[in-house]
Image (tube, rainbow, N blue to C red):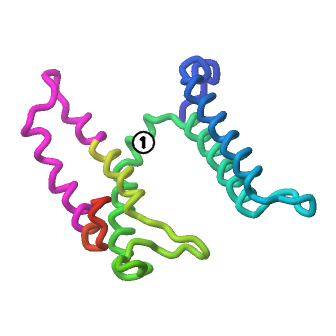
Amino acid sequence: MRKIDLSRLAENSCWPLILTTALLMAAGLVNLYSTSGSGEAEFASPSFLKQMAFSLAGLFGLTLFFLFDYRNLKSLAWPLFLLCLILLVLVKYFGLHAGGATRWLPLGPLRFQPSELTKIGLVLVLAHLLSRHQEARGLDFQDLLWPLPLIAVPFFLILKQPDQGTA
């Protein structure tokens, strides 16, 4: 594992984007707090506390992603993609049915939609494969056709849920 160079990380970060995101998050929290009907008897409403928890979790996740070396994603591309396919198959047998569709897996009190993770897994595996087969001349049309069967498997699994928008 590579050593994290914090000075390089600070130098190459998009600080205007980070600052804008933080300001929008803070404005949203202030707005929610002011409209949530919190009286003197309680500090904050449950919806505000829930949003605050999600905001802190998002900041924690952002920090982890900043510290994560993206080159390690190459080794995770195939395992993540295979995990996504397994989860999509599990939806068919163990998924929760709601609104005419079976798209979610129960995880205790939470529900998880594997098709959302599959978007990330498919992008990673395609980027890994296409970057390996890229030649100095670039990719031609035929190079873009061979990944179609790889795309078709999750496409049809998601289409069976049915979820045409994600498929």
Circle 1: element type = helix
Q: Quadrant of the image for the C terminus?
A: bottom left
Question: In this view of the protein, which residue sits in the foreground, 117 or 36?
Answer: 36
In the rendered image, residue 136 lying in the magenta stretch gets the answer yes
Q: Nearer the viewer, residue 150 or 48?
A: 48
Seen at 16% across and 21% down, the residue is 136
Q: Which residue is drawn at 58% across and 19% down?
A: 8
**Residue at (15%, 52%) from the top-left corner?**
148
Viewer-proximal residue among 121 and 112 = 112
| Horizontal arrangement in the rendering, residue 128 relative to residue 15 (left or right) | left
Question: Magenta residues: mostly which secondary structure?
Answer: helix
Residue plotted at (70% across, 59% down): 50
Name the quadrant containing residue 127.
Answer: top left
> Left or right: 153 with respect to 105?
left
Q: Which residue, as the protein is rendered here, is positioned at the far right?
A: 41
The image quadrant where one finds the N terminus is top right
Residue 165, placed above or below residue 145: below
Choose top left, top right, bottom left or bottom right for residue 72.
Answer: top left
Magenta-tinted stretch: 127-156
Q: Where is residue 41 in the image (x, y as percent from the top left)?
A: 92, 63
Report the number of numbered marks.
1
The percent position of residue 107, horizontal first and vertical second, equals 55, 73
Q: Which residue lies furthest to the left in this view?
A: 142
Q: Which residue corresponds to mark 1?
A: 73
